[in-house]
Image (cartoon, helix red, strand yellow):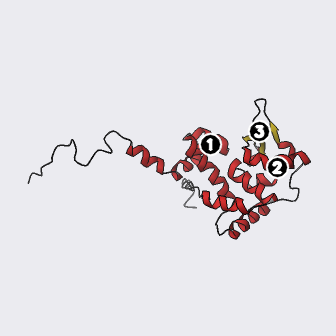
Amino acid sequence: DITAGLRRPRTPVGVPRPVSEEGLALMLARAQGVVRAWVLLGAYCGLRSFETAKVCGDDLEQSASGAWLLRVMGKGGQTAVVPVPDVVLLELRPLCAATRGRLWPDATAQAVQFAVRRLAASCGVYCTSHMLRHRYGTALYAVSHDLLVTQQLMRHQSPATTAGYALVTGDRVAQVAASLPGANDAVGAGRPTLRLVR
């Protein structure tokens, strides 16, 4: 084998494709019941479709400080805790009060994915369940400008994966560049005239 001993090329890190805020608003305006809960868990807690399908009633808990948290069994069987914003809490609390077991016993990752795509299509929006998670990560970074916080809440193993969410919000780059001293001065103001010598 002539390729034996050669190092494999690195797989490029994919760039997140978040659903737009307008698209999310359209989906939430139409979504009801179980599918609404699934959209909220993806967009506001960053759950993957297989994590959403496995949510149990006893996964929702209140901390000593009063914050609501959701235990999530993620990739590789790793357990993490994510904060639950009010918009998700309003949907989850009644469901979790009714059962300690799985909220959707028959749900699978594929069922979540299919339901989200079907809802999005009915709204004229292109969105997958993972695009809801991408929206969560992009929004986290846009608000915090903190890769470590975003990495922790997204539950990424590698900061390189999280760095892609910073690239999506490129408007911040333009703002920083425009804020450099002298960047907004009138063209030529305070600069010596250059003469070309032939």
Q: Is residue 129 left or right of residue 169?
A: right
- Mark 2 or 3: in front is 3
Q: Position of residue 54 (x, y in %)?
A: 82, 52
Residue marked by disc 1: 151
Q: Quadrant of the C terminus?
A: bottom left
The answer to whether residue 127 is visible is yes
Q: Residue at x 67, y 56 (%)?
A: 132
Q: Is residue 99 visible?
A: no
Question: What is the number of the mark on residue 164?
Answer: none
Q: Which residue is mark 3?
A: 68
Outermost residue, front side: 29
Residue drawn at the location 64% of the way across and 50% of the way down: 136
Position of residue 14 measured from the top left corner of the image (x, y, whole percent): 57, 56
Q: Is residue 103 above or below residue 118?
A: above
Q: Residues within 10 Å of mark 1 (few under 14, many from 20)?
A: many
Q: Nearer the viewer, mark 3 or mark 1?
A: 3
Q: Which residue is mark 2?
A: 55
Task: Tell me if residue 24 comes above or below residue 191 in the rendering.
Answer: below
Label 3: state its secondary structure. Answer: strand
**The N terminus appears in which quarter of the rendering?**
bottom right
Measuring from the top left, give residue 20's x and y in whole percent: 60, 59
Which mark's residue is nearer the viewer, 1 or 2? 2
3D distance between C-alphas at marks 2 and 3: 15 Å
Secondary structure of the residue carrying tag 2 is: loop
- Name the residue at 42% across, 49% down: 174
Q: Nearer the viewer, residue 138 or 68?
A: 68
